Amino acid sequence: MFGYLVAGALGGIVLVFWVLMPSPTRRCGVYVQPNKWYPFKYAVFRLLLWLRRRRNRALKQTTGKGAGYGVRSRSTPEDMDKVQDLPQDQPLAVDAVYFNGGDADGNYMVAATARRHDNLVQTILLFRFSDLGILEIPSMPDTSLYTTEPNTFGAGGLRLEPVVPMKKWKLSYQGKMRSRKLQKEVKVNFSLDWDSFTTFFDFDTDMHPATMADGIAREQWSREYFDNLEKAHQTHYEQFGVITGQVEIEGHGSRQVQLRGVRDHSYGNKRDWKNLHRYALQYASLEDGSAVCVGAISMPCNISRLTVGYVFHPDGSMDSVSSSELELYDHGEDGRPPQHLVFKFCAGGKLYEMQCDVLDCPIFYMGVEWDAKINERFCRYTVNGVKGWGISEWEYGNYVGKKAEKEWYAKHEA
């Protein structure tokens, strides 16, 4: 009897200490760390994801309402891979496509358009040639352009057109680009083909449940929190492909390109760059035919630490990233991304080590008020000893304002 009393007393003391245990402080004042409720919340959200994925498999038609976290946004790939409507009652709605590519010789390309309301198209166009250096569309580092063709992915002479859903796109441009090496603008003309060599990875349905549950379980739960998650949801999918064709550059003739890299498409009711604190995304095409994405995202109003990624294998199979050592607070929290980066991650039960070395890094800004600063890093990669190339994109929220960033850019980049 006495033993039961002692055990009960000790249990009560442990319970009191557990209840009174404070939550760990946020790393760098941003990144929420697991607290005493984390294991329970993690298990609950893993179950919720399982139930939503089960529901998704049974769905024959979907309108997009309630998408994400295991449920797809459209009924078919054809409905996904096209120009999407921007709801008039959603002023921050977005429909954005992005392409990048590179090769073993150090040549790279990035092209992107983000359709917004009022004919605004946030537009990016970059080349990096091993002998010419960087070429950029003259409007950069500002990306805010306007179009007279609101239902197209295009502005400023750049046009990105779907041809066969999830299979083929056409990328074209006619206009001037600024050469950093020559310190002048040159005429550039191209009509390029993009052809996929992987299936698509849908972040709504294909993310590993461990990384999603980890990100959500760290946060403070409330009805308002989950309402905000739903409002901020964007469908996002990615696949790897190859860009081929001729690029004509004034004074430098015509160049044949064959650039392997990633394409993505995002659409949703709300994209507010002010809500993003940071992200760091690595995209690598490897010599053995593999394709890798791994990164970390911090949006403190929703999820302050989220690991994302996948590995496409040469045989076409795919594994989602289940864990990663890449922590934003360990790398570049001072606003200076590392030029050399090594970290490990796990996908499909296999441990990988990624090494990333930066060759060049043009910078541009997203948002009319330059709300986000993007470091578009042209890189060489090594993953488990296999060499490759690709883009490492590191984003920072602009906390100093447009004027200060313009002054910084003029001093350091122009």
Image (cartoon, helix red, strand yellow):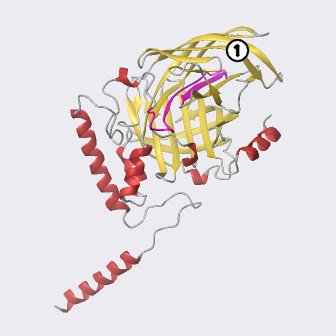
| Region in magenta | 87-116
Location of residue 94 in the rendering, given as x and y in whole percent from the top left corner: 50, 33
Location of residue 105 in the rendering, given as x and y in whole percent from the top left corner: 66, 20
As shown in the figure, which amino acid type bears the numbered disc 1? Gly
Residue density around tag 1, few if under 14, some if 14–19, many if 20 or more, within 10 Å: some
Answer with left or right where residue 305 lies relative to residue 217.
right
- The residue positioned farthest toward the left in the image shown: 1
Residue 107 drawn in magenta:
yes
Above-or-below relation of 136 to 244 = below
Location of residue 31 in the rendering, given as x and y in whole percent from the top left corner: 53, 57
Q: Quadrant of the C terminus?
A: top right
Q: Secondary structure at mark 1?
A: strand
Q: Is residue 130 visible?
A: yes
Please name the residue that numbered disc 1 is placed on: 175
Q: Quadrant of the N terminus?
A: bottom left
Location of residue 273 in the rendering, given as x and y in whole percent from the top left corner: 57, 43
Front residue of this view, candidates 54 and 62 = 62
Q: Give the residue at x 27% y 42%.
A: 52
Above-or-below relation of 144 to 26 = above
Above-or-below relation of 3 to 124 = below
- How many marks can you see? 1
Q: Give the residue at x 56% y 44%.
A: 279
Q: Give the residue at x 37% y 27%.
A: 317
